[in-house]
Amino acid sequence: MQTTLFTLSAIFWIAALVCLPSAIRGQRRSLLLFLAVFALTMTLMPQPVYRPVDALLGNGNVTYFIFHALAIVAIALLDIIVQQAMSPNDITRARQRATALVATAIILAQALLFFGSDWRVTDDIAATFIPRWDFTAYAATTWIAMGIFAISFGTACLSDLRRQRRPVTLISLTLVTLACLGVLTYAVISLTSAVLAVIYPDFLLIGWARIAYTLTLILSPISLVVGLGLSAAVDALSAGRRNYRDRVLLWRITPLWQRLLGASPDLSIERSLSPLQLLTVRAPGVHLYRRHVEIRDSLLIHPGQTVTPAEQAIIDLAEARTQARPPVTAPATGSSPTGARR
């Protein structure tokens, strides 16, 4: 189980890293923040991490409280993502503040229930349902929030499925919907088991309920993170492939650009790049476009200049690349909860 938890944590951190390029470009920042918080939450679960961290915090199971608090923060961030996707004019500041206030109120209630009780010092706090009402009330704050959000988010995804046409978005929404179903199942089983553990001292979570509890605990986070990060991953791969092709062509066209513009530098507004900069400059497609245009201008103004068939092939390839770029349009109103625009 510990290996499984470590694997889950690694998957979530990888998903966050995949979303990082989009966040740098100003997209999916809420998704990146959610993935980072969720990854940190899951990282605290394995005992090889939990116990050293808790020892640093005084061995009072404070890490358990942090885990639940981070779960509430993650739920709040998911709520913001849903509101951003479903609101015609993006989420308002008032709605963001309301989400933050509700999350803060829940965490404060958790703090009162946690630090005001003695059950928190038990050695097996993270591995069982403690037969006490104050523990049940504490844990229920997270389970109920998870269940309510699972219904809300799942409903939004089902509604959005009918409007999406992009295959990767449909797959993302399906995975997130399945994750919401799993989270709801996990929350219901957890809350029911905690109540039964208080009422019946000999209660044990066994049979199909234990199997469902374990499977949803493992599979739901994976389905949620993969679903939320799939569009970002596909877009990142597509952008990386496009940038690679642009960079290769930029490297090939630069000697021709230098030769033709050397006699008439006044035609050029493009800055000179060193060989290292050609390999590392951001947005190579922009420089490719500028150099292609300046080569064309130079050939029109100075028709006596000659180019070899190989150089002409590079010019034609650059023209095909620059003309194949999709037009820049204003973003559509609303977006999918998984991050794709409608």
Image (tube, rainbow, N blue to C red):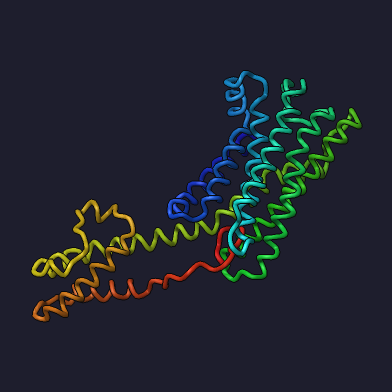
Residue that protrudes farthest toward the front in the picture:
94
Above or below, 326 against 15 in this view is below
**331 lies left or right of 303:** right
**226 lies left or right of 219:** left
Q: Residue at x 75, y 38 (%)?
A: 141
**15 lies left or right of 74:** left
Above or below, 192 against 316 in this view is above
Determine the image quadrant of residue 302: bottom left
Residue that protrudes farthest toward the right in the picture:
200
Q: Position of residue 156 (x, y in %)?
A: 69, 60
Q: What is the tally of numbered marks visible in this picture?
A: 0
Front position in the image: 325 or 45: 325
Q: Residue at x 58, y 25 (%)?
A: 53
Q: Position of residue 176 (x, y in %)?
A: 65, 55
Front position in the image: 207 or 150: 150
Determine the image quadrant of residue 246: bottom left
**9 lies left or right of 253:** right
Q: Which quadrant is the C terminus positioned in?
A: bottom right
Front position in the image: 282 or 55: 282
Q: Residue at x 60, y 42 (%)?
A: 38
Q: Position of residue 290 (x, y in %)?
A: 26, 67
Determine the image quadrant of residue 33: top right
Q: Position of residue 256 (x, y in %)?
A: 16, 68
Q: Which quadrant is the N terminus positioned in?
A: top right
